[in-house]
Image: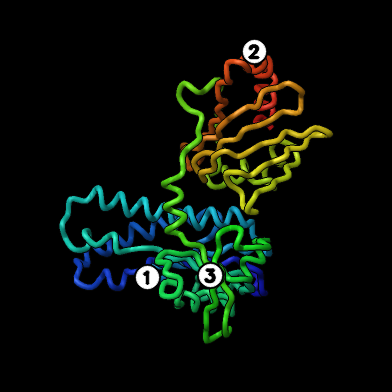
Amino acid sequence: MTGAPEKACLVIADISGYTGYLAGVELDHAHDILADLVSTVVGSLRPMLRLAKLEGDAAFAYVVTPAVEGSTLQETVEGTYFAFQRRLRDIASASRCECNACIRIPDLDLKVVVHHGDVIRQKIAGREELLGPAVILVHRLLKNDVVETLRVPAYALYTADCIAAMGIEDPTRQVFMEHRVATDVAGEVTTWIRDLAAAWADEQASSRVIVEGREVAWAYAFESPAGRQVTWDYLTSPIRRPQWNSDAVVESSPTGRRGAGTVNHCIHGKDAIVEEVLDYRPYDHVTVRSQLPAPGTPRLVHSWVLEDGPDGGTHVEMRFARPKPRDRAAFDQLLPMVQGIVSHSHAE
């Protein structure tokens, strides 16, 4: 708590449609539903972001950082929307109540505003408060014409400052839409819009690639003391991975964002293992096809699968797929070496 300006990423997740939803519904049920949904949103924003405060039907969160890991921030924002939609679906399907508050649950949606700028953290009346023009701006940007102009009912709005802090050179490659928002505090602000409803539709429609059941040839399991989001970050981020497996990782993606289609070169000395990401489901599983540098070795397919563990930790399984019949002999020769590498990496 310095009292001096610090660079921070600011996020407001706002439940849209709630004011209209309240009109003519039973308040006791409506407030219970709101509390449930806000709890879902806050839980999904953590641990990357720290809750600054609850603001009625919105959660204001932040992380102090001069630069932002772009893929991780987008995973957090979109993961929050996916969790919100799943919770809406679960509440609606589990409820037998026919009151208006329960019937009109589908009227609710979520919008997210993300900015990066200078803030000052101060203690006021025993509470930490964020102050500064960036805090004012991120709140002003909640009032915009995105829905009316772009016809996007559920969206994430990123300011150009945030896009720059994320290191994204061409936002259009990642399906962002440019949109200018007029404000009374900063004039016209350039923003980039991600259609969250479209992202949710893609999430539901895309096929899963995961090693499971009889497809598993060998599996390695361990318990991580960290939650799923942090554990996921260490398994997938090229910045985090060298902290536990000693290899430098060079990542390339057709869009510039980590996901299916990303290719990693894991460099150990003069050799490199080439990994192609086949499926990428934060914070559930990621499936990779790897080519080892030794001539004649078959490509290996494995999934990292994450589940909630005891005491807030994560149960992790690394599952290797059975090879094709023609590769079985080579796979059997290769497997003891792979087992040794995996066991050694996770023992460190």
What's the residue type where badge 2 is placed?
Answer: Ala
Q: Earlier in the sequence, mark 3 or mark 1?
A: 1
Q: Position of residue 306 (x, y in %)?
A: 51, 37
Q: CA distance from mark 2 to mark 1?
A: 62 Å
Mark 3 nearby-residue class (10 Å; few <14, some 14–19, many ≥20): some
Q: What residue is shown at x 28% (from left), y 52% (from top)?
A: 91
What's the residue type where badge 3 is placed?
Answer: Glu
Q: What residue is shown at x 61% (from left), y 67% (from top)?
A: 162
Q: Earlier in the sequence, mark 2 or mark 3?
A: 3
Q: Position of residue 193 (x, y in %)?
A: 52, 66
Q: CA distance from mark 2 to mark 3?
A: 62 Å
Mark 2 nearby-residue class (10 Å; few <14, some 14–19, many ≥20): few
The kind of secondary structure element at disc 2 is: helix
Residue with the mark numbered 3: 128
Q: Position of residue 233 (x, y in %)?
A: 60, 46
- When asked about the image quadrant of residue 295, the answer is top right
The kind of secondary structure element at disc 3 is: strand
The numbered dot on residue 56 is: 1
Residue 52 visible? The answer is no
Residue with the mark numbered 2: 329
Q: What residue is shown at x 33% (from left), y 69% (from top)?
A: 17
Q: Earlier in the sequence, mark 2 or mark 1?
A: 1
Q: Nearer the viewer, residue 314 or 125?
A: 314
Q: Is residue 161 left or right of residue 81?
A: right
* Residue sticking out furthest to the top: 329
Q: Is residue 138 left or right of residue 236?
A: left
